[in-house]
Image (cartoon, rainbow, N blue to C red):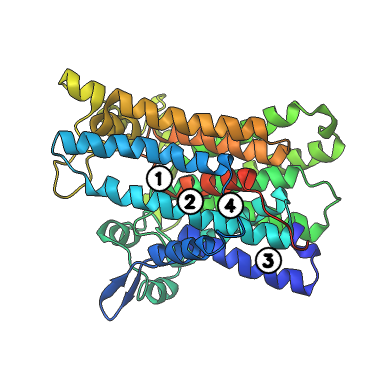
């Protein structure tokens, strides 16, 4: 792997930076003396404050401000609609504040990286890949080891849903409060990024590097199984994009690339078959039936269906009033003080809150900024990561809302977008 080629000083810097990014993405809520402490907010606030201290020497450029405006413009609309209809959704207000803080926090993470490692996008993607792998290890250890589970969750907060998932041997929330589709999305994204790095490694890899990649892929796939099947859709999208987008650069489709792709395919088939038979004969029957439900249903009834697809079909509905359909009513369905919206679908929730106007404004601006970043960049890895995350977020919102800055996948998008658009004077590399 790329980071293994560093001298001792660089390895220490890389290790410290990896921990900082991990805390930004996955920092948990801690329980101390019965009090829940919001560590994610503290981490973001610290990074934000540190970046604002740079303001005298590092001014903003238009490309950076664009990402902030992508969120501020829709949020101003959302808040205005909420005030007009007297449905003030405080969840949206919190996300509005978080969008601003996250912008500066991620900007600081980009500054720290580029000052120490330069504009090495593949190394930056390696950090994101390793963040996913490390969290996958935490997910697996807390799920399969009761001792580790009791130790970790004695000080890491998880809600009632997360507790129920663990008790039923159904899912693993890791360091998140409950896990689920959002967690499966980011674990799947880390897997796809890892596959891209594996296939596009320019140097000949050693056997140890091969093994590290293969083990990491196995751990990440298991973490997707332990979080949500939505992640497999993201993996399919990502792998197709890796092949299609690499096909546009014919010169990289060489013997080395082909052998790595074939070895990955053989591993994937072997791993899935092995997992199928091991889980089917284990005590984790609920996990087995959830992960392989579609395959089991197809073999027994010949239909590609699952409980999730059935539930999802019941969640597609729109506001009855024309004014609410066009402009929304300010309620996104998750504020305790407002009526609950019985749909998880991202587009449905945004339409109820901000209408077709607000939904178009939010997602079109986000896609436009991703397209702008894609066109602006001349680095293949940057282009791939931007395109992959943008497409995945569009698909993800068919299942659950994945737009606000607290969403795990959006954190990855912020990191990639600002890596492309933030200019930093490199001190040393």
On the rendered structure, is 100 left or right of 86? right
Mark in the foreground, 4 or 3: 4
Crowd band around label 3 with a 10 angstrom C-alpha radius: few (<14), some (14–19), many (20+): many
Nearest-to-viewer mark from 2 and 4: 4
Q: Earlier in the sequence, mark 4 or mark 1?
A: 4
Q: Mark 4 and mark 1: span between their CA atoms?
A: 37 Å
Q: Are marks 2 and 1 in contact (CB under 8 Å)?
A: no
Chain-order first, disc 4 or disc 3: 3
x and y, in percent, of residue 143 in the image: 43, 63
Camera-nearest label, 3 or 2: 2
Disc 3 versus disc 2: distance between alpha carbons? 22 Å
Residue 276 visible in the current orientation: no
**Left or right: 253 in relation to 291:** right
Q: CA distance from mark 2 to mark 4?
A: 14 Å
Q: CA distance from mark 1 to mark 3?
A: 30 Å
At 75% from the left edge and 38% from the top edge, which residue is drawn? 262
- Mark 2 or mark 4, which has the lower sequence index? 4
| Disc 3, SS | helix
Residue at the disc numbered 2: 103
- Residue with the mark numbered 3: 14
Mark 4 and mark 3: span between their CA atoms?
Answer: 26 Å
Q: Which residue is mark 4?
A: 59
């Amino acid at each position: 792997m790329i980071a293994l080629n560093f001298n001792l000083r660089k390895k220490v810097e890389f290790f410290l930076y990896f921990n900082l990014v991990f805390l930004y993405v996955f920092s948990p809520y801690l329980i101390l003396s019965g009090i829940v402490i919001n560590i994610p907010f503290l981490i973001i606030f610290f990074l934000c404050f540190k970046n604002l201290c740079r303001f005298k020497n590092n001014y903003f450029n238009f490309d950076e401000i664009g990402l902030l405006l992508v969120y501020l413009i829709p949020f101003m609309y959302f808040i205005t609609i909420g005030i007009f209809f007297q449905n003030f959704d405080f969840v949206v207000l919190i996300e509005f504040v978080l969008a601003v803080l996250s912008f500066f926090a991620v900007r600081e993470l980009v500054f720290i990286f580029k000052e120490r490692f330069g504009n090495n996008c593949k190394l930056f993607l390696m950090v994101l890949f390793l963040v996913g792998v490390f969290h996958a290890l935490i997910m697996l250890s807390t799920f399969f080891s009761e001792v580790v589970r009791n130790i970790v969750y004695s000080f890491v907060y998880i809600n009632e849903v997360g507790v129920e998932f663990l008790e039923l041997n159904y899912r693993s929330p890791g360091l998140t409060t409950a896990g689920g589709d959002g967690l499966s999305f980011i674990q799947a994204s880390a897997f796809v990024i890892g596959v891209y790095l594996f296939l596009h490694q320019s140097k000949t890899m050693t056997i140890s590097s091969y093994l590290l990649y293969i083990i990491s892929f196995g751990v990440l796939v298991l973490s997707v199984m332990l979080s949500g099947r939505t992640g497999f859709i993201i993996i399919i999208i990502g792998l197709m994009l890796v092949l299609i987008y690499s096909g546009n650069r014919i010169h990289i489709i060489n013997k080395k690339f082909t052998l790595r792709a074939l070895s990955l395919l053989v591993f994937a088939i072997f791993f899935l078959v092995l997992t199928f038979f091991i889980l089917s004969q284990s005590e984790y029957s609920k996990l087995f039936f959830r992960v392989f439900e579609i395959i089991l249903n197809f073999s027994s009834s010949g239909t590609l269906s699952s409980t999730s697809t059935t539930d999802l079909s019941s969640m597609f509905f729109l506001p009855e009033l024309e004014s609410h359909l066009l402009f929304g009513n300010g309620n996104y369905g998750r504020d305790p003080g407002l009526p609950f919206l019985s749909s998880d679908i991202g587009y449905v929730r945004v339409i109820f809150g901000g209408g077709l106007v607000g939904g178009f404004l939010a997602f079109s601006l986000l896609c436009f900024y991703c397209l702008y970043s894609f066109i602006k960049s001349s680095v293949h890895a940057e282009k791939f990561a931007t395109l992959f995350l943008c497409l995945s977020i569009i698909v993800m919102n068919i299942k659950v809302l994945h737009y606000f800055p607290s969403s795990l996948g959006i954190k990855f998008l912020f990191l990639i977008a600002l890596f492309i658009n933030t200019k930093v004077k490199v001190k040393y590399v």
